[in-house]
């Protein structure tokens, strides 16, 4: 995207909003707006498409969807279109600390204890994207411009979005173009996204023993190893580790990586899964965190990773982005408010200020919680190691508190 100066030419809006970014959050935001009667354009080139193969059956990137995210997708009539063979319910979560033997902390969350069928659902990124893309094609009021943004300019409270296909004029831009959002930067809303100097290494494994819909996570030597159940005898590994360690790990062959995972101290993966057979390549993605101080200004809204980036150890990144769109749907659901917005235009500042307050109140605690947990398990001081593992054991013996934590995570 090129940097452009403000235009002096008069322009009139062609639509109510333009969503910049063709990811999951951007598509959901567009569907929410269009289903409320607004004219929307989604502007962004289609991301590289994952194609299953005998050696790479599952998309390496998977999401753990919360109950609220599921309700958002269900309300948009998207959830039931996800192929059942691509959705894995999670009935239990098990978390181990970095102690050893009797000193190892442990937490267990079970769906039966919380009164639900599933704690969460594991869904492939590509499967979710495909059903959302199909939905916007059939939703009146949405136009998809399958091109990158070449330039942005603003004049008389109207943004001009320039692509090779056409130029769109709109009073509102929704920046849903990721943690390194170019739209955010050009709108003057940029902020420092802090780098953990760490990466998440992901790989899919076939397993010998059934996973029974259990997600497991271990804190080990400044790393976080998660094994997420997939449909059938498969699991998705997400191993977060310092950058120096991830660089060495990515040089391993798939078979050597499987052997390294089985040797993780205190994890006992062989007892849980038996032999791990790699299914395809391993990949790595950078770990970052931060929350934008301002989410709305001059007709630009930050949404999803453009507004907030959290550590993946709690699996809440995409859920927070989908909740951004869900909160908007809730505000628009009020008939009185909807009439006022239609009269004032979708760029009504009061609407977005209310939305920003609510979303910040929800996202900021999650950011500090995940960042705090990440830092807590990196502290190597006398007594801290023992205290954090003992704390996990005590928490595991308090059913009411565990139930409350589960409900907060599921929302």
Image (tube, rainbow, N blue to C red):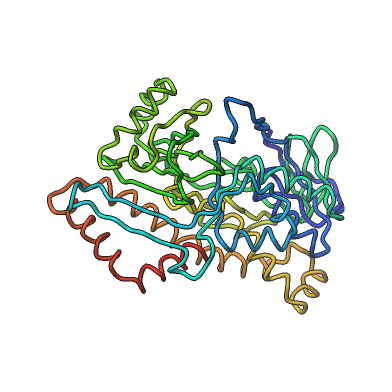
Q: Is residue 29 visible?
A: no
Farthest residue to the bottom: give it.
336
For residue 8, side relative to residue 20 (left or right): right
On the rendered image, what quadrant is the N terminus found in? top right
Residue shown at 68%/66% (left/top)?
A: 349
Front one among 254 and 71: 254
Residue shown at 29%/32% (left/top)?
A: 263
Front one among 330 and 364: 330
Q: Position of residue 55 (x, y in %)?
A: 57, 25
Residue shown at 77%/54% (left/top)?
A: 17
For residue 60, side relative to residue 399 (left or right): right
Q: Position of residue 400 (x, y in %)?
A: 36, 74
Question: Which quarter of the figure has residue 57?
Answer: top right
Q: How many marks?
A: 0
257 is higher (above) or lower (below) than 175: above
Q: Is residue 106 visible?
A: yes
237 is higher (above) or lower (below) than 106: above
Q: Position of residue 103 (x, y in %)?
A: 18, 52
Question: Which quarter of the figure has residue 32?
Answer: bottom right
Farthest residue to the front: give it.
209
Question: Which quarter of the figure has residue 165?
Answer: top right
278 is higher (above) or lower (below) than 410: above
């Amino acid at each position: 995207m090129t940097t452009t100066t403000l235009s002096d030419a008069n322009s009139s809006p062609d639509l109510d909003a333009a969503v910049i970014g063709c990811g999951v959050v951007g598509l959901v935001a567009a569907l929410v707006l269009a289903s409320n009667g607004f004219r929307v354009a989604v502007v962004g080139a289609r991301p590289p498409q994952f194609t299953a193969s005998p050696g790479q059956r599952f998309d390496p990137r998977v999401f753990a969807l919360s109950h609220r995210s599921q309700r958002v997708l269900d309300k948009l009539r998207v959830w039931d279109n996800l192929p059942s063979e691509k959705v894995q319910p999670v009935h239990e979560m098990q978390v181990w600390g970095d102690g050893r033997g009797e000193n190892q902390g442990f937490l267990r969350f079970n769906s039966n204890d919380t009164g639900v069928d599933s704690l969460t659902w594991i869904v492939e990124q590509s499967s979710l994207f495909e059903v959302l893309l199909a939905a916007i094609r059939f939703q009146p009021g949405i136009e998809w411009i399958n091109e990158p943004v070449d330039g942005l300019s603003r004049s008389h409270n109207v943004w001009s979005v320039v692509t090779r296909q056409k130029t769109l004029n709109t009073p509102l831009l929704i920046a849903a173009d990721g943690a390194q959002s170019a739209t955010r930067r050009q709108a003057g809303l940029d902020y420092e996204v802090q780098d953990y100097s760490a990466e998440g290494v992901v790989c899919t494994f076939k397993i010998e023993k059934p996973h029974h819909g259990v997600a497991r996570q271990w804190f080990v030597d400044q790393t976080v190893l998660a094994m997420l159940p997939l449909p059938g005898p498969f699991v998705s590994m997400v191993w977060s580790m310092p950058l120096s360690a991830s660089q060495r790990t990515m040089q391993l062959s798939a078979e050597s990586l499987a052997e390294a995972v089985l040797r993780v101290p205190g994890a006992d993966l062989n007892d849980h899964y038996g032999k791990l057979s790699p299914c395809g390549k391993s990949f790595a993605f950078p770990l970052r965190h931060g929350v934008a101080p301002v989410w709305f200004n001059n007709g630009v809204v930050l949404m999803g990773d453009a507004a907030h980036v959290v550590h993946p150890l709690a699996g809440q990144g995409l859920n927070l982005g989908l909740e951004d769109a869900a909160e908007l749907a809730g505000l628009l659901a009020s008939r009185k408010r909807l009439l006022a917005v239609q009269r004032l235009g979708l760029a009504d500042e009061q609407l977005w200020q209310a939305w920003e307050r609510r979303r910040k109140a929800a996202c900021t605690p999650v950011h500090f919680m995940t960042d705090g947990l990440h830092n807590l398990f990196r502290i190597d001081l006398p007594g801290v190691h023992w205290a954090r593992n003992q704390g996990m054991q005590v928490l595991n013996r308090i059913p009411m508190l565990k139930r409350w934590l589960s409900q907060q995570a599921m929302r």
